[in-house]
Amino acid sequence: MAQSTNALKKSKGILGALALLAVAVGLWWSLLVAPPDAYQGEVQRIMYLHLPSILTAYLSYFLVFIASGMYLWKREPKDDLLAHAAAELGVLFTALTIIEGSIWGKPTWGVWWTWDARLTFTAVLLLIYAGYLVLRASIDDQQRAASAAAILGIIGFLDIPLIHMSVYWWRTLHQPPSILRPDKKPWENVHPAMLTALTISFVGFLLLYFYLLSLRYRLGEMRQEIKALRLERGI
């Protein structure tokens, strides 16, 4: 048992070190190797954080969606733990995305915030999953809290297609995708050094995300273990 625990800690440490290395290399490539944008200049470099942030948030909410569905189906506590952990990290990365977007928007659009369709739906996404966390905390019964949160977690995921399609369905300030375009391959529309910087940053964010997820999931397990001990001892 002790050996498996030590091996798990070691694997988490390796994952954390790889995440730190990838993020550092991504920042170096983004700031020093990739050229400035032809139209936006140096301010465009925040894209190398902004895009990986929102894609990581989407991944997190997808895990909430899957784990919530699995919990409603099988009622396994581990699925609820995963959904809860992923939701917290999703809120973190969505908030980071909005902050980065505001920093990018000020010199580009002249304002920190505007009620653009994509920005508005992203803010709604943040509120939905912040509400998810509040809902869990406001219900004392753990099973009822998990069930109610699972339903909200599944419904909230439906906002993500709206975010993606908003730049096509409405006239918005937010630019349409520059990389994932149906008419061009990514390397035909983006400088190779920019594409490399973005790829490295995204890999770094993914590694960081799964490192944080493993820590948050273990924290949830420890909380359950403490509750079980308290019940056993009648505390």
Image (cartoon, rainbow, N blue to C red):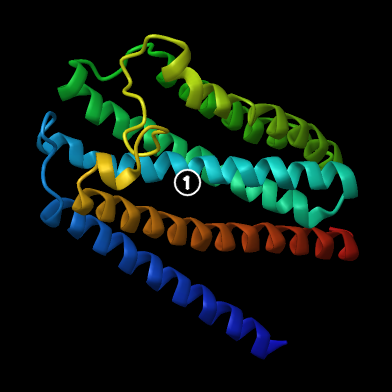
User: Residue sitting at 40 percent across and 43 percent down?
Assistant: 53
The 10 Å Cα crowd at callout 1, few under 14, some 14 to 19, many 20 or more, is: many
Circle 1 residue: 56
x, y percentage for residue 108?
18, 22
Instruction: Please state which of residues 130 and 138 is positioned toward the viewer in this rendering.
Output: 130
The residue under the point 69% across, 36% down is 137
Q: Is residue 32 left or right of residue 118?
A: left
Residues 43 and 33: in front is 33
Residue 103: image location, x then y, percent: 24, 30
Tag 1: residue type? Thr
Point 69% across, 63% down: residue: 222
- Report which quarter residue 146 is drawn in: top right
- Residue 120 appears in the picture as rendered: no
Residue 9: which quarter of the image?
Answer: bottom right
Tell me residue 207's x, y (percent): 45, 62
Please tell me which residue is depicted at 31% across the width and 34% down the height of the picture: 178
Q: Is residue 209 visible?
A: yes
